[in-house]
Amino acid sequence: MNFRRYLTAMLFCLTFAGEAAAQVKTLVFCSEESPDILNPQLSFRQAAFDASSRQVHDRLVAYEPGTAEIVPSLAESWQISEDGLRYEFRLRPNVPFHKLRHFTPSRPLAAEDVVFSFMRQLDPKHPYHEVSGGIYPYFRGLGLPKIIKSVTAEDAGTVIFELKSPYPALLSTLTLDFASILSAEYADAMLAAGTPERVDREPLGTGPFQMIQHQRDALIRYVAHPGYWRGKAPLDNLVFTITPDATVRYQKLRDRECHVVANPDPADLPAMTLDGDVTLVRQVGMDIGYMAFNTRKPPLNDPRVRKALAMAIDREAILKDVYQGLGRPATTMVPQGLWSRGGAPSLPPTDPDGARRLLEKAGISGLELEIWPSPVARPYMPDARRTAEMIRDDWLKIGVESKIVMTSGRDFIKQTMVGRHDVALFGWIAETLDRSLFLSPILGCEAAADGANRSFWCNRNFDRLLEEAARTSNPSERETLYELAQSVLDDELPVLPIARSISFTPMRNEVVNYRGSPLGGHYFYGVDLK
């Protein structure tokens, strides 16, 4: 039996076949991409977060849905010292971990699990630091090794974060996916067995769903965690089917093989709107689709060249042709919703003649470049290849030749992280309401060293301004620092913002209580089926 027939049969048996089977609720999510790894500490990709941290794990604190208020999660309370250097978290008692076929926990959540989850990332001598590659893009990209001094257990239910300097953004930071809490006991058992990588491939958490099967590039299966501390999920089973083609995802939705699908093709939305069996959840994204210039490669290390290339691009035409009404022009990397003052900056206007003059002034002629488009469609970049084609045509008008390099999803990530590209097209989603936490992982110096900063641009003044903004508790001072940091970006232009998305999540009408998040991602706790 092929996979598609198997999945159809499974759905029939579990969801649609009689009164007894109707007691079991199975939701199938058509995901567009396979996760690169199943430990959110080691990734910065939405597919990894959707598959792991948003279903399997919890964090110490969380955002109240639809607000900027930080509320308790695994930590039921916390205290901050007057000098801002000590955070004490009191853990929620009796929170059970999942059970796996090869491991059964002997205890509930404890402080040592929190210590393990952060010290693995912080301490280069930690036995797990180098496991599975040992790259922690968020932790390092946010500069946390320079901020966090230690994470220790005062007792089984109390965790202490000691900081090197005040960092008011710590609570916002701890809402991010990389701050998920893993099991120290599971890690110790796998290390003793000589298989520490299993912690990152076969995750065990405290979240609403536990993973029971992962078939790479095909499917991921979960069952509801019966002891979840917030109460068992209404769904009994959750299935991710990896379906890269948007047209195929829509066909599966119509054929009842999927209940929810990710990232529809904008061209399919009119038909979905007329489909009486489909509901569209609309969400204005706090995201950015952009182009990164590899500033390590001459002449792209010259801001004048980057500005000239930016001035040649007709971004309004890209919005019309590629986004088809589902995008908004972006003038800054920071989403508009994160600007608390007016006066967000403006990019250089489209001006091919001015671009040619600027290239001549920089002494550049006969320039040839490679454009690397992301092969995975996202709301913030629904068709990177078509975007690259339009940029290629615009650059040709100013005498710049360019070649489009298409790769697989995993190869794109790998090759751009080591700087094979001249320019690359992809995007980023605001997973927090703090601007420094949005910018540092993709534009900071630490992120350049790790490759998450695809422009490889490192400006110490920019980093310093973001660090100062994250550390000050005065809103007016913070805003001034962010505006100064933005002016550095305007002058240097290592990246070119293109658009922000208006995204839709299509689902069958029997799905209830699904809510989109402006911070991105798919969360299935609380979702039900009629």
Image: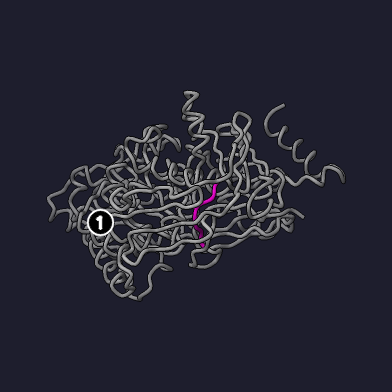
At 54% from the left edge and 37% from the top edge, which residue is drawn?
203
Image coords of residue 40 (percent x, y): 47, 44
At 50% from the left edge and 47% from the top edge, which residue is drawn?
156
Relative vertical location of residue 470 with respect to residue 236 in this rendering, above or below: below
Depth order, front residue of 126/222: 126
Image coords of residue 55 (percent x, y): 58, 47
Left or right: residue 17 versus residue 80 is right
Q: Which residue is mark 1?
A: 463
Magenta span of residues:
57-63
Disc 1 element: helix
At 63% from the left edge and 45% from the top edge, which residue is drawn?
209
Question: Which image quarter is the N terminus in?
Answer: top right
Image coords of residue 452 (percent x, y): 34, 45
Numbered disc total: 1
Residue type, numbered disc 1: Asp
- Residue furthest to the front in view is 155
At 51% from the left edge and 38% from the top edge, which residue is drawn?
38
Question: Which image quarter is the C terminus in?
Answer: bottom right
Q: Is residue 102 magenta?
A: no
Quadrant assignment, res 526: bottom right
Quadrant assignment, res 419: top left
Image coords of residue 103 (percent x, y): 59, 31
Report crowding for label 1: few under 14, some 14 to 19, many 20 or more residues within 10 A (C-alpha).
many
Quadrant assignment, res 424: top left
Left or right: residue 338 versus residue 402 is right
